[in-house]
Amino acid sequence: MSLAYKIIKRLMITALVGTAVAYGWLYLKAAFVQSYLQQLALVQQAREISGFISVDESGAVTLNLPPRLSEAYNSVKSSYRYAVRDEAGRIVAASGRGIGPLPLLMGSQRRLRRGSDPSMPPCSMNSSPMAAG
């Protein structure tokens, strides 16, 4: 083998390894961004839904969604669902089928507090896209 052939061979291997590493990094970065955007969308949906939650004098929680949102979440073709739960994890309001038990997030439940009013009870919220089927 000539010296030029060995140099070309090593350069090709180096370029292939570098390309594989670069594509791997880009793939991982894209997966991270996709996951972040999904989480951001879920938080935005939870905030939007929480704006329509009301608590009466007896402590009963009701959800009064406007027709546009109600149709979007309750449509048969919709792939989005929501569940509003009380402190005990019981479902207070839901978009219908496909709402299961409260998932554990890193060993504990995350709770959203509506506004800064300490007299208002915290509400656990799940809003997740599910495959329509």
Image: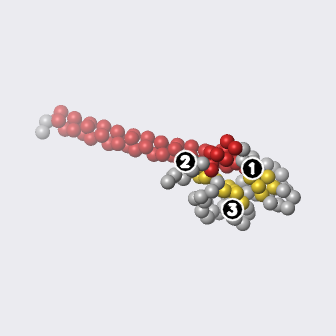
Rendering quarter of residue 101? bottom right
Rendering quarter of residue 3? top left
Closest to the observer, 14 or 59: 59
Where residue 25 appears, as percent x and y from the top left, is: 43, 43
Residue with the mark numbered 2: 77
Where residue 121 appears, as percent x and y from the top left, is: 79, 58
Element assignment for label 1: loop
Mark toward the viewer: 2 or 3: 2
Q: Residue at x 85, y 61 (%)?
A: 58
**What type is the residue that disc 1 sits on?**
Asn
Closest to the observer, 27 or 48: 48
Marks 3 and 1 sit apart, C-alpha to C-alpha, by 15 Å
Which label sits on residue 64? 1
**What type is the residue that disc 2 sits on?**
Lys
Marks 2 and 3 sit apart, C-alpha to C-alpha, by 23 Å
Which label sits on residue 34? none
Vertical comparison of 86 with 48: above or below: below
- Left or right: 2 in relation to 131: left
Residue with the mark numbered 3: 91
